[in-house]
Amino acid sequence: MLGLKPIQQFWYGLTGYEFTRHALDMRRELEGIFMVLTVGDMVGVPVLPPVYALRLLPYLVLEVAQWKREMARRKEFWEKKEYDFQGV
């Protein structure tokens, strides 16, 4: 007999999954914008004075490598995956 867990998972997939994915995508985009504004000089976009970037650097050290890889994958830093029509 079906338990409660599969029904809960089905209901979440039906109603909440899209909201969760959208929230995670928005968070990733906002983190990317924050990284560009704070340590953008690493990829050639000097926005903030280095003093403020150096104050925030201890909190961003773990994310810098992943952010640089993500920026290197994009042709332009404002590109998003949803505008990629290669699979269509």
Image: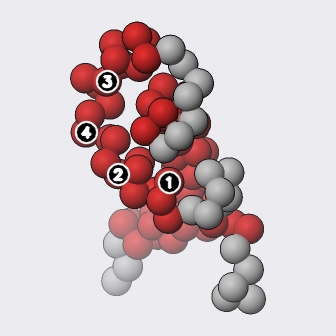
Report which residue position mark 3 lands on. Answer: 57
User: Where 53 sits versus 87, above or below?
Assistant: above
Image side of residue 22 versus residue 72, left or right: right
Report which residue position mark 2 lands on. Answer: 66
User: Where 51 sits versus 30, above or below?
Assistant: above
Image quadrant in which the C terminus is located: bottom right
User: Where 59 sits versus 40, above or below?
Assistant: above
Task: Using the rendered image of the protein, determine whether residue 20 is visible from the camera's viewpoint.
Answer: no
Residue 63 in the image: state x and y as whole percent: 32, 41
Report which residue position mark 1 lands on. Answer: 71
Report which residue position mark 4 lands on. Answer: 62
1 or 3: tag closer to the N-terminus: 3
Residue nearest the viewer, comparing 4 with 20: 20
Given the image, on which type of amino acid does mark 4 rest? Leu
Residue nearest the viewer, comparing 75 with 17: 75
Q: How far is mark 2 from mark 4, CA to CA?
A: 8 Å
